[in-house]
Image (spheres, grey):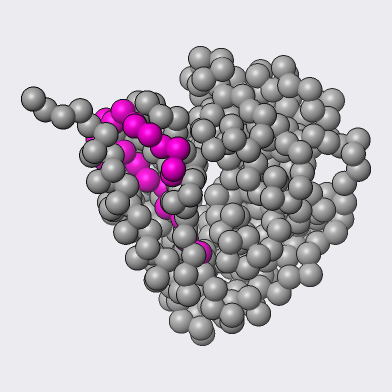
Amino acid sequence: MGQSHLPILLVGITVRMLAELAVKAGYPVLALDYFGDADLEALCPSLSLRHDYNQKYSATALVDAAADVDAPTVMYGASLENHPTEVARLARGRRLLGNQPDSLSRVRDPRLLAKAVRAAGCAFPQTFLPETRVPPGEFHRWLWKPKRSGGGHGIRPWDGEAVKNDGLLQERIPGMAGSAVFVANGQRAVLLGLTEQLVGRRAFGATGFGYCGNLVPPRLSPAELTSLFKETETLVAHLTQTFGLWGLNGLDFIWRQGRTWTIEVNPRPSASVELIQLAYGLPVFEAHVRAFEGALPDFKLRQALERGLAAGKAIFFAPHDVQLGDTSRWPAQGIRDVPHPGEQIKRQHPVCTLLTTGATPAACLRRLYSKAARLKRQLKSFEPKKR
């Protein structure tokens, strides 16, 4: 990438992961997000909506703040995929290392995505938008979802109410929640990883359908992993050509009885990409940047799966309102997205991210549970002593 395109401005609700991957790959970056975590500030020059602008989170507020930053190239992370108009504003006068607004609008449209997935011979849950006729009864079969979904927030079992313009109904498919990471150059795609998603795990303080982490690879038998790999590889290639996808992208799915049920596409680097680098040593940020030059990595995921390396991450949510003490040693303990000492975090709000590696995904999950238990005890020690 030529020096004329540097530095890269990273924008999203949280961009620590992207900044860490960029710095490891040797790219100079500037960061703008909501949280402004301590380890992000240690990585690169950064601004935070919360700390520097004293503003609540919104995509509009992020893009407004980005106008203050002088950077010729921009890359967006989580949450902005739901706001193509804001992405267009963000990219004005800059080189965009991300999917174009038109691609975002199309791939995030459930009707267009369902049509594309089924055209590839794959499964998509029955979905009802506000203007379609809602099925009578059998409430347990359906989930209500916000149209601008992310991280499982707002998803709940349907209770029979009318579907309004801010939501949709989707058939509830039982099975293993998973995701795929792939990199694309508008025409072709390379599958980089398959994950098992951790959802609503009480050990991490999560509830309901809330996303709280990933395991790479999923805890499946070798035969199931092979079947999942084959179907997903075909699917991401078809989706790339249909929607003209570029760079790192994520695909959320349910794996059930040998079939992949697509839930949605996240047309930006998903939360699990750092696990691909941890498990397989693949420089994913470099792969993202090079994709916009047309180059894709010579990476064979099937061979990587056979080597048996694994990684895991968990987002830890506060079990109660807490004021943090000294968090300066957390990064050395495999903790990321580290809040500042003294920061106050409300119950069920995210505290930090736990990372680990291991010989198997099951071993990674056990280590994440252990890390979460230790962290919970540490948060307890931060509470003031009762007299």
- Could you tell me which residue is drawn at 35 percent across and 42 percent down? 317
Residue at 73 percent across and 51 percent down: it is 25
Q: Residue at x 35, y 65 (%)?
A: 366
Which residue shows up at 76% across the image and 56% down it? Answer: 287
> Height in image: 68 above or below 90?
above
Q: Residue furthest left?
A: 387
341 vs 383, left or right, is right
Q: Is residue 230 magenta?
A: no
Please say if 120 is above or below 96.
Answer: below
- Segment tinted magenta in the rendering: 311-330
- Based on the picture, tell me whether residue 329 belongs to the magenta stretch: yes
Q: Is residue 253 above or below residue 36?
A: below
- The x, y position of residue 338, in whole percent, is 46, 38
**Residue 311 placement, left or right of 155:** right
Residue at the bottom extreme?
223
**Is 286 displayed left or right of 77 in the figure?**
right
